Amino acid sequence: MWSSSVTTGAELSIAGITAKTLAKEFGTPAFFIDEADFRERALAWDKALKDAFGLHAGTVYYASKAFICTEVARWIKEIGIGIDVSTGGEMAVALAGSIDPAKIEVHGNNKSLGEIEKAISVGVESIVIDSLYEIERVAAAAKKAGKVQAVLLRITPGIQAHTHESIATAHEDVKFGFSIASGAAWAAIAAVRTHPSLELRGIHAHIGSQIFGYKSFEILSERLISLLAQYRDEFKSELPELDLGGGYGIAYLPGDETVNPAEAMNALAAAVTKNCGAHKLQIPRVSIEPGRAIVGPTMFTLYEVGTVKDVTLENGTHRRYISVDGGMSDNIRPSLYGAEYTTILANRTSTAPHVSSRLVGKHCETGDIVIREIDLPDDIVPGDLLAVPATGAYGRSMASNYNHVPRPPVVAVKDGKARVIVRRETEADLLRLDI
Ligand SMILES: Cc1ncc(COP(=O)(O)O)c(C=O)c1O
């Protein structure tokens, strides 16, 4: 839930700096990212993949959609793992952070021609193709550039991952990929093979996000490996790459489980080895794309309380509404898919009894809820600071300017020093686009 350098006993601190000091220097709301923790998590996934798969370890591609900025792209480059981008914008940030294009994998279910041409011209490692149209577009763009582009096909394996509907991505009724069951995957393989400007290197699937347990990943490897075997039987050659996507879950609430990288990779390696053995197939290079599991727990959001209001409900009970200075513009996940968070009083300790409270934002929507129900000290007053952990993934990256609220900064904290890596938006930023 919290990153490794956070202490929460008395006043919250991260890497030795207290919440009060941070709020004074950087204002609120703000995201604070624990740099050492980010690096440790990325390295842990890299090590886990290498330890579990040995010679067959492919690449850990950090899923940049979870959160990216130029400085974090520099960290990725230094750590030495790859990156998955799904738009031209994410690719631009990766390149601005000097990530070697040969470590960039390009996703997206509707890449523009411009995005495809840019990816090919900078020399990305691979493009994961998502539709028949895109096969033609990538082939034509590669031909025009005089290149042979390495591609993977995004496959829909027909798996109902146990997570929220909006973040389950591999059952049949989704916009992503080529379905195995309907024969679309096989048609796509045949279509790619007709283009000399494309080199089919393998297949990819991503079953969803915030997934626990390894069963879905085992079924995924079984289905994809049987497609690889079908390919070998038909074309008498083997595809060298298998990318099994991201989706590993993290803890948001006290007591939540979290996925252990070594355990997850050992389970995956066991499943891949078993399924390849069953088909007498060589083990391909296996890659993964964790986003949330790397960046999620590394950040917390610090808010300042602005108002506290008790309302009387129809049944005569009371509900306390605590309003903070951010909300759905910096964390859309609770309103988007009922995601749950916790919070703690960050600027002081309190011995006051706890009362059931609802933490809300400052936006003009009743649904602007950060935490629907949580017991918080009775003596919380305007000016207090509240810290919400595990906001690193899909928080700042999904932030909006709803109500023309400037988006919060991201501040990196390490060894007692804090520095802004994404500055706070200003009203001038908001006005800059208006003609
Ligand atoms: C193709 C692909 N890979 C990886 C990810 C990262 O998922 P997570 O952050 O849950 O690890 C996503 C998330 O949507 C995705 O669509």
Image (cartoon, rainbow, N blue to C red):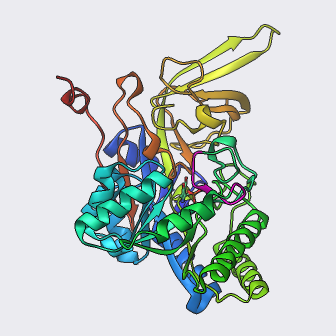
Residue 289 seen from this side: no
Q: Residue at x 72, y 55 (%)?
A: 158
Q: Residue at x 37, y 27 (%)?
A: 405
> Dividing the image into 4 quarters, which one contains the C terminus?
top left
Is 172 on the left-hand or right-hand side of 154? right
Decide which of 58, 378 is in the foreground and name it.
58
Residue farthest toward the left in the current orientation of the protein: 435
- Magenta-colored span: 175-182
Residue 251: within the magenta? no
Residue 63 position, x and y percent, is: 48, 60
Residue 378 image point, x, y percent: 67, 28
Residue that sits furthest to the bottom in the current view:
55
Return the residue found at the far right: 315
Please tell me which residue lies in front, 178 or 193: 193
Q: Which image quarter: residue 280?
A: bottom right
Residue 369 in percent (x, y) is at 59, 28
* Ligand 1 sits in quadrant: bottom right
The N terminus lies in quadrant: bottom right
